[in-house]
Image: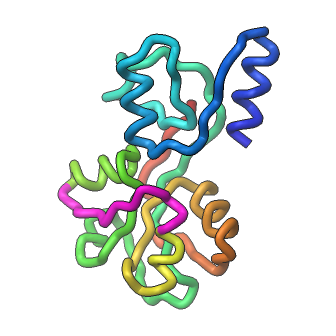
Amino acid sequence: IATDIVREMFQRAGLTYSLTLRFPWERVYKLALENPGYGAFVMARLPDRERLFKWVGPIGPDDWILLAKADSKITLDTLNDARKYKIGAYKGDAIAETLTKQGLKPVVVLRDQDNAKKLLSGQIDLWATGDPAGRYLARQDGVTGLKTVLRFNSAELY
């Protein structure tokens, strides 16, 4: 839905734009930082990013969660409890960066939806993602039956 919102925003503003949806997140982020006239969406508005961008939005909420397979016995009370598990995350994403800053070592992929299959195949124990984005991405690849084992942060998407 974020793409529809951004397209509508440009249409209402009467602005000409080009929208590319196929670049890895790190590349999009770098292009937006280094090139006037470039932007990135959907991005969590966080204190360390505040001065780096001109913000338009919010588009919606972004609850950061850890997902597990439906039959998983994993229970977590805090993010620190997740240290003993293999956690999948999206390369360059604020969630992956936050996990790394907190001393966790996420296994990162270039496409967030790849984590759904890695979770089902047992390559990772948990998937750190935004809700409902994670469930949407999983369904796109036919993956269902995931459960939230921890909600560990909340941000606004812009």
**In the visual, does 20 lie left or right of 4?**
left
- Callout count: 0
Indicate the position of residue 3 as horizontal and vertical percent values: 70, 37
Residue 105 is inside the magenta segment:
yes
Rendered location of residue 110, percent (x, y): 42, 56
Is 81 part of what is drawn in magenta?
no
Quarter of the image for residue 139 reads: bottom right
Residue 117 in the image: above or below residue 127: below
Point 48% across, 53% down: residue: 64
Which of 115/46 is in front?
115
* Residue at the image point whose x is 70% and y is 28% from the top: 6
Range covered by the magenta-colored residues = 103-114
Q: Colour scheme in the image?
A: rainbow
Residue 65 or residue 142, whichever sits in front = 142
Instruction: Locate residue 4 relative to residue 49 in the image: left or right.
Output: right
Quarter of the C terminus within the rendering: top right
